[in-house]
Image (cartoon, rainbow, N blue to C red):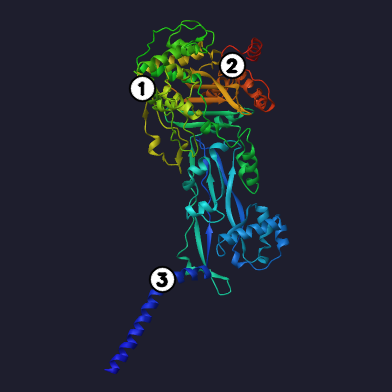
Amino acid sequence: MRKLLLLTIVLSTGLLFIGRLFYLQIYDTSASALSENNAIKAEYDIPQRGRIYDRNRNLLVSNQPSYDLMVIPREVKPFDTLALCNLLSITPEKLKKELKRARVYSPRLPSVIVPTMSQGEYAYLGEQMRKYEGFFIQKRSLRDYQIDFGANFLGYIQEVNQGIIKRDEYYKMGDLIGRQGVEQQYEEVLRGKKGVKYLQKDRFNRVIGPYKDGILDIEPEEGKNIQLTIDATLQKYGEELMINKRGGIVAIEPATGEILALVAAPNYDPALLVGRERSKNYTQLDADSIAKPLFDRVLQGEYPPGSPFKALTSLIGLQEGVVNLNDKVYCNGGYRYGGKKPLGCHHHKSPVQLISGIAHSCNSYFATVYRNTIDKYDTPQEGIEVWKKHLESFGLGNFMGYDLPIGRKGLVPSSTYYNRTYNYPKYRWGTTATISNAIGQGEVLMTPMQMVNFTAAIANRGWFYKPHIIKSISETDTIYSKYREKHITTIDPAYFEPVVQGLNDVYNYGTANFLKIPGIDICGKTGTAENYTKINGTTTQLTDHSVFVAFAPKDDPKIAIAVFVENGYWGSRFGGRIASIMIEKYLKGEVTRKDLETWVLTHSLEDEYKKPLEGKPFPINDGKKISAKFLAEENQDL
């Protein structure tokens, strides 16, 4: 019995040891992970980012070789600090700071000490690396811009921060990530997949060969190439026209929603945000709080739309049955109501009907249509909500859903908005309290992207696709389904034809008659948007903005465009000229109206932008107050 007990104890003890060893070898990975951290080195192979092309397969962005000096802090041996700093052209303080940052991140994992070294720096440093244990050089690729424009929609790449590393395990210290524009929007497509090689080290920390003969190694996959809808020739031309001006141009193809040009002014050379000078250059751009080159006015600028909004006022009035083509409105220089200051109007023939009202941009006509629309309902609150629903069907008052990472949704005011503004029901408000909405000078705000979208919807006679900048991915027809979904407005298609004719007559005999382009039947609308800002705490009216929307040809539209020029005086002065020659450039491939082109290229608004800083007066344009002398000079320029 004692022998049996002793045998049982021996067997049980043996089984316990075997079980524990089996658990440690098979199930417990902590020892294995620790062993790998000490004895296995992972070398990552960062793939090249995908290239970027325009709609005509012109290369916009490729790659160039670059090199990072990396460090594994626990492997660093004493070295000559000053000698290394001289090699790297950095200060000892900078080196110490980067080494400390690397140790905080991880003593065992590699971190970047000096990023984006050139080929020459790499060649010079490579010969010396044997003197600096724990340091090594990692090859990567940086962006190589083939163009010096388009920074606002291309975006840039920068080093990831700790927040990104914590959120996404794909990224390690020193990795690069797309920021802004298509670089950010299509980051997962462009970045590709990292490769990794696992190397076995001996007890002296020397690499002795591939770990497990390389069966765990992963080959890198290059990022996919993407083709944009942008026409690089049109984009470059638009940026040239906007030199010494602030604002934006956006053009789309109405039949598809493809963005042809996306010009934000002022802009900058995208190459400024590449290489070791990237951080310094970005800081300088970001510090410019006056011109704001990093602020994309096309997507983020919210402005009163001005007179182009009258086309929407017309469509809503027709849909609501409060106006027809034969109704006449008399205009005596403005719309007068309730003893208040009238909505001033341009001098033109009176009376006007819908088509001539659009052509002459008659404020009295559209104020009447708007008032009849709201007053059709029992309360102004109910009328405003119906009006708002129509506008929202054109994509207004909300984010457009385009494939770029930034934007603003503008504003289409609701009855709740006005109830809060006027402290209802303590104080009641009526239609005349919102009458400025009729002419795009009320509380309505739009981005230029929203302006071009409603213009495209009119060109299509009542429908649109969401604007988008991606055309294909890796030469395949890879467009997300949401960009193939047709959005239908609340306006009956039959009501668009007279409005389109009115927009066409803007060029035939209306406010843009001097902007005609030979051989192209253009529909457009001038706009003058009032411009207010606070100077030393006081609301001050500055020079009006120049607004213009257009599409062409009239019956088979290939391009819709919106132009917004800050402090540009009135719609046809800058906006109309720019839109007209942009349309001609796209449809014909050349510009024949050299008079318009020369005028735009030789006229700057820089002095206009300095006036708020210098306390100078501003010319206020309400349709009457521009001096005869000024108009004479304007006509002479034509």
Q: Gap between marks 2 and 3, in whole Å?
A: 79 Å
* Quadrant where the image shows the C terminus: top right
Location of residue 139 in the rendering, given as x and y in whole percent from the top left corner:
59, 56
> Can residue 193 be seen?
no
Mark 1 neighbour density, 10 Å: few (under 14) some (14–19) many (20 or more): some
* Mark in front: 2 vs 3: 2
Query: Dot 2, crowdedness within 10 Å: few (<14), some or many (≥20)?
Result: some
Q: Can you say whether 349 is above or below 125 in the image?
A: above
- Which percent across, then down, holds residue 614? 69, 26
In three-dimensional space, the C-alpha distance between marks 1 and 3, rounded to whole angstroms, equals 69 Å
Q: Residue 493 vs residue 61: left or right?
A: left
10 Å crowding of disc 3: few (<14), some (14-19), many (20+) = few
Image height of 339 relative to 282, above or below? above
**Label 2 – label 1 distance at C-alpha:** 34 Å
- Pointer 1 or 3: first along the chain: 3
Which of the two residues, 519 or 152, is positioned nearer the viewer here? Answer: 152
Which sits in the foreground, 43 or 439?
Answer: 439
- Where does the image place residue 273, in percent across and percent down from the top left? 61, 43
Which numbered dot is residue 28? 3
Note whether 405 is above or below 606 in the view shown. below
Which element carries disc 2, helix, strand or loop?
loop
The N terminus lies in quadrant:
bottom left
Number of numbered discs visible in the structure rendering: 3
Q: Quadrant of residue 597?
A: top right
Which residue was labeled with disc 1? 382
Contact between labelled residues 3 and 2, with CB atoms less than 8 Å apart: no
Kindly identify the amino acid type of the residue bearing the numbered disc 3. Asp
Residue 621 marker? 2
Report the amino acid beneath label 2. Answer: Asn
